[in-house]
Image: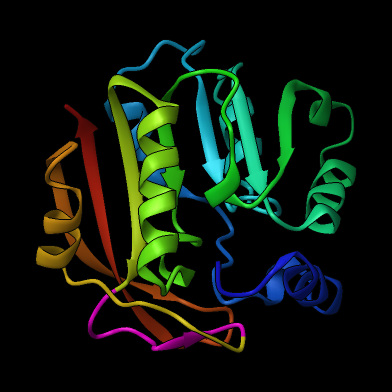
Amino acid sequence: MTGDKQYWEGIYSSKNYEDTSWYQSKPEFSLNIIESLGFSHEEPIIDVGGGDSILAEALLQQGYSDISVLDIAENVIERAKERLGKNAEKIDWIVDNVTEFKPKKKYGFWHDRVTFHFLTEEKQIKKYLKVLNNSLKENGYLLLATFSENGPKNCSGLPIKQYSAEQMEKLLQDQFETVRIQNIDHTTPWDAKQNFTIGLFRKK
């Protein structure tokens, strides 16, 4: 992954979550997709790169009970635990580099809206896809968001890899079928527009 553990812990120690470009006051897009799939509230869900995200908190509020959050930066996970208080005990917090992650269970839903486009080397991408395939149940779902070909080329001081809808589908086509894919604009806390490619896929 572009940027190691020390790098990302430095980023999070210098910024509040509300000051990051990926900040959302409510993760409505992701929540709506998860709700639309009709999961049991016991379905295992993992939020990759979600250390300070509010998705896990929102899922708890919706009644989901098997939630994992993976992030490379331990300090951002500790910050999220502090914010959630006793509710933090209901979440499985995982400090790891996603490309090295060894899952202890199979997930029904893999959520990644901030991590994948930081993988700029072919070997990193292959390792991520292997971990993803090993982590998801058969017919499990993947929600993947990256900067599009019309989005930024850098984020948090690091280069990223852009994906068009066609490139994302081609990358995943051997193991996943496309449910839906689209481009949307995300508005940062400083009112900048960032164009994303967001795809929902089902494991074959």
Q: Is residue 63 above or below residue 118?
A: above
Q: Quadrant of the N terminus?
A: bottom right
Magenta-colored stretch includes residue 143: no
Q: Position of residue 133 (x, y in %)?
A: 35, 34
Q: Is residue 52 above or below residue 9?
A: above
Q: Is residue 23 left or right of residue 176?
A: right
- Residue in the image at 75% along x and 64% along y: 5
- Residue in the image at 75% along x and 21% along y: 90
Magenta-highlighted stretch: main secondary structure?
loop
Q: In terms of depth relative to the viewer, which is nearer, 180 or 25?
A: 180
Q: How many dots with numbers?
A: 0
Q: Is residue 11 left or right of residue 36?
A: right
Quadrant of res 147: bottom left
Image: magenta residue range:
148-156
- Residue in the image at 19% along x and 49% along y: 172
Q: Is residue 91 left or right of residue 100?
A: right
Q: Is residue 130 above or below residue 65?
A: below
Quadrant of res 170: bottom left
Q: Quadrant of the C terminus?
A: top left
Q: Position of residue 75 (x, y in %)?
A: 86, 57
Q: Is residue 130 left or right of residue 75?
A: left
Q: Position of residue 3 (x, y in %)?
A: 64, 74
